[in-house]
């Protein structure tokens, strides 16, 4: 068991190296770099002469040299990755003119709080409903949640967000956007700010969790229906186990296994998911930041994200694989 | 059955129906059956004759949407001390009608696994794949017996020894997929017997096993029956198993008992055309015709009818070679006593 885990971790290392190379190549792929668009911006604002001057010497040249943008790709990559691994320095956001690290962390923390809560909410709501729907198949309750589930699947999250925003604004005269009240946005962390976050959190969680819950209910119901008629359920019944205990102890336990393998994708989705909803509700999460970085070719910022997301996928897959082995004894790890 | 003392289970006119969209399937349609303490009773029939549903109805685990429409399932209970001390002792403490119980209620659950236990056809699928053998056996012991986990484990290991499981202390912590088919069925039997049931319902326990393992399991069950003294209801389609295992046999066709007799009477003096046909369709080595030629294996023509359109009259008449036109397809025969403890449901004997 331990050997299996160690081997899996060792195998993840070459994967991560490959991923870092690919990430770097990908962010370099679009023609030009940030400095090209930077010069274009100066040209439009200050005229050709200023642009020429900036390009020849001055600001741009300094930047180009500092970040080695005139070096060949492998050298640039090496500089980039060693800074990350050795110093935790993800580089500089050209657009926002601050270090990528300072830019990412607070948003990342908020994102993880938001997405983690959403995930927890989704599971807590969807699993019991899915189980109930399967056990009482074709009952009134099952039909009710099936309808609700399909509605939840069909309505795009951002649309729901827009509708709720409008309703809140029109009828309750409040704004429901953001994760904090205005006076807390730039305030340092205090208990008051945490409480304020809690007060704002539930609505995005509800909106973000809706389609997730809906699809999870469907999957849980289908998985469990497959298990409910298995002979081992009958065996447990023949032993005199209480019906509720029996359902949760045997078929639900087996039906949950497939979910564990989705953790691999759940981790990166924690960071990059919900971008559109975050934009609509102006939530200070990582999604909108990533989108902007990609659009403006803010290469170090975008690169940091791509690398972060890929690493999370690898870690997530690793966690799923280990959990699956722990949960399902039929999976051999020799 | 005349011998009414020592009764353990009396099934009276049991009807278990499945209301489905296409119509009602009468899986069990008026079954009468008796089992005495310590007796081994066989229930034979083709696939789809309702024998498994009947067995599950007795346990009150009839599969959904099946429902017991009418009938009685009288369980003649003895207290645990009486059950243990003297199997042959007549008398009982109380009679309970299982058919009246809520299948999921505490009384039915208290009987299931304790007084009536069941073993199933698929020893692999009948164990949870994600729990150890120990976990699954101990669960039942903890439900029905007032013991702690350590003691329950001791009981479980003792039961595994009793079913001749090799290295029970080691095997008990294995998962079902790590065991062979025969070992799984042994574990299943150990689990069923861990609370000393008065009745063991065995639903084709050897069908999924290879022939050698089959023979071992049957021998084991006979030994256990001799040592522990529980009654066994043996559900099977294999007449060879019936001959080896049982004292008394019920032949079932489309939800009804068509013939019941002691195993000797059944094999030597079968009355019902269906039973006769079943017996003829057993392959026998060296069976010759009068001319000395190898005889082709007899088959029962046709198949079990569509459960939604059961033939009128005697349900067997379309496949019967002794059909009396104008009678069999019109009137349903009643059960007739044709010998001592020998009933048959056929117009030929009325």
Image (cartoon, helix red, strand yellow):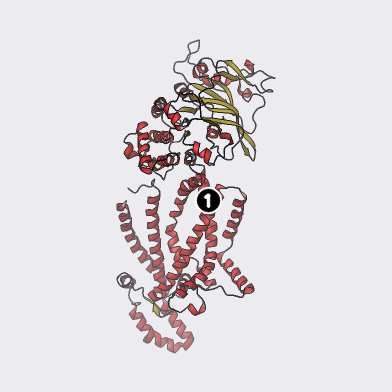
At 58% from the left and 66% from the top, the residue drawn is: A160
The picture places residue B339, in percent across and down from the top left corner, at 56, 15
The picture places residue A194, in percent across and down from the top left corner, at 46, 72
Q: Which residue is mark 1?
A: A131
Which chain's residue wears label 1?
Answer: A
Q: Is B28 on the left-hand or right-hand side of B214? A: right
| Res B330 → quadrant | top right
At 32% from the left and 61% from the top, the residue drawn is: A13
The picture places residue B285, in percent across and down from the top left corner, at 44, 18
Q: Nearer the viewer, residue A273 or B160?
A: B160
Q: Is A86 on the left-hand or right-hand side of B348? A: left
At 45% from the left and 60% from the top, the residue drawn is: A266
Q: Nearer the viewer, residue B336 or B140?
A: B140
Q: Nearer the viewer, residue B214 or A195?
A: A195
Circle 1 — which element? helix
| B234 relative to A119, above or below | above
Q: Is residue B284 visible?
A: yes
Q: How many marks?
A: 1
The crowd level at tag 1 (other Cα within 10 Å; few <14, some 14-19, many 20+) is: many
| A316 relative to B345, above or below | below
């Amino acid at each position: 068991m331990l050997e299996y885990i160690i081997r899996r971790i060792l195998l993840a290392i070459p994967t991560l190296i490959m991923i870092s190379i690919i990430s770097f190549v990908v962010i370099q792929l679009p023609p030009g770099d940030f400095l090209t668009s930077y010069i274009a911006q100066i040209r439009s604002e200050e005229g050709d002469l200023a642009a020429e001057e900036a390009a020849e010497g001055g600001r741009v040249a300094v930047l180009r040299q500092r970040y080695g943008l005139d070096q060949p790709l492998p050298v640039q990559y090496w500089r980039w990755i060693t800074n990350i691994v050795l110093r935790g320095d993800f580089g500089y956001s050209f657009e926002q003119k601050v270090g990528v690290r300072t830019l990412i962390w607070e948003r990342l923390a908020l994102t993880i709080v938001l997405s983690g809560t959403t995930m927890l909410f989704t599971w807590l709501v969807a699993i019991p409903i899915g189980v109930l729907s399967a056990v009482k198949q074709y009952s009134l309750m099952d039909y009710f949640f099936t309808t609700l589930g399909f509605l939840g699947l069909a309505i795009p999250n951002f649309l729901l967000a827009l509708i709720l925003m409008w309703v809140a604004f029109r009828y309750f005269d409040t704004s429901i956007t953001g994760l904090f009240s205005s006076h807390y946005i730039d305030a340092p962390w205090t208990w008051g700010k945490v409480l304020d976050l809690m007060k704002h959190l539930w609505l995005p969680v509800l909106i973000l969790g809706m389609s997730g819950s809906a699809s999870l209910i469907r999957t849980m119901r289908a998985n469990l229906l497959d298990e409910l008629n298995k002979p081992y359920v009958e065996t447990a019944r023949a032993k005199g186990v209480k019906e509720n205990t029996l359902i949760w102890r045997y078929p639900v336990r087996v039906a949950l296994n497939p979910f564990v393998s989705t953790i691999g994708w759940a981790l990166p989705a924690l960071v990059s998911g919900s971008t559109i909803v975050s934009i609509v509700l102006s939530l200070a999460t990582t999604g909108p930041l990533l989108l902007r970085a990609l659009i403006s070719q803010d290469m170090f910022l975008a690169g940091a994200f791509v690398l972060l997301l890929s690493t999370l996928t690898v870690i997530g897959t690793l966690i799923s694989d280990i959990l699956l082995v722990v949960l399902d004894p039929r999976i051999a790890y020799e | 059955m005349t011998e009414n003392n020592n009764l353990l289970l009396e099934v009276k006119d049991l009807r278990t129906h499945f209301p489905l969209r296409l119509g009602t399937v009468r899986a069990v349609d008026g079954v009468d059956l008796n089992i005495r303490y310590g007796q081994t009773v066989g229930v034979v029939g083709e696939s789809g004759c309702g024998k498994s549903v009947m067995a599950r109805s007795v346990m009150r685990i009839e599969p959904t949407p099946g429902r017991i429409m009418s009938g009685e399932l009288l369980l003649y209970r003895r207290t645990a001390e009486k059950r243990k001390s003297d199997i042959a002792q007549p008398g009982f403490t109380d009679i309970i009608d299982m058919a009246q119980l809520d299948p999921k209620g505490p009384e039915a659950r208290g009987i299931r696994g304790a007084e009536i236990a069941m073993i199933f056809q698929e020893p692999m699928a009948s164990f949870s794949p994600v729990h150890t053998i120990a976990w699954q056996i101990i669960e039942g012991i903890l439900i029905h017996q007032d013991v702690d986990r350590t003691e329950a484990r001791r009981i479980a290991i003792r039961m595994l020894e009793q079913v001749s499981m090799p290295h029970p202390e080691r095997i008990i912590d294995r998962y079902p997929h790590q065991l062979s088919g025969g070992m799984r069925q042994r574990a299943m039997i150990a689990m069923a017997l861990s609370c000393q049931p008065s009745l063991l319902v065995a639903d084709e326990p050897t069908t999924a096993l290879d022939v050698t393992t089959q023979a071992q399991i049957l021998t084991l069950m006979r030994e256990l029956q001799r040592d522990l003294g529980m009654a066994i209801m043996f559900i099977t389609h294999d007449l060879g198993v019936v001959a080896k295992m049982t004292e008394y046999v019920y032949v079932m066709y489309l939800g009804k008992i068509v013939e019941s007799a002691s195993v000797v009477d059944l094999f030597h003096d079968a009355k019902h055309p269906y039973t006769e046909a079943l017996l003829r369709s057993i392959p026998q080595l060296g069976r010759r015709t009068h001319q000395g030629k190898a005889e082709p294996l007899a088959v029962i023509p046709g198949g079990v009818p569509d459960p939604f359109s059961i033939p009128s009259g005697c349900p067997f008449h379309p496949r019967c070679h002794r059909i009396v036109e104008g009678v069999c397809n019109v009137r349903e025969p009643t059960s007739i006593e044709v010998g001592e403890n020998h009933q048959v449901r056929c117009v030929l004997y009325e």
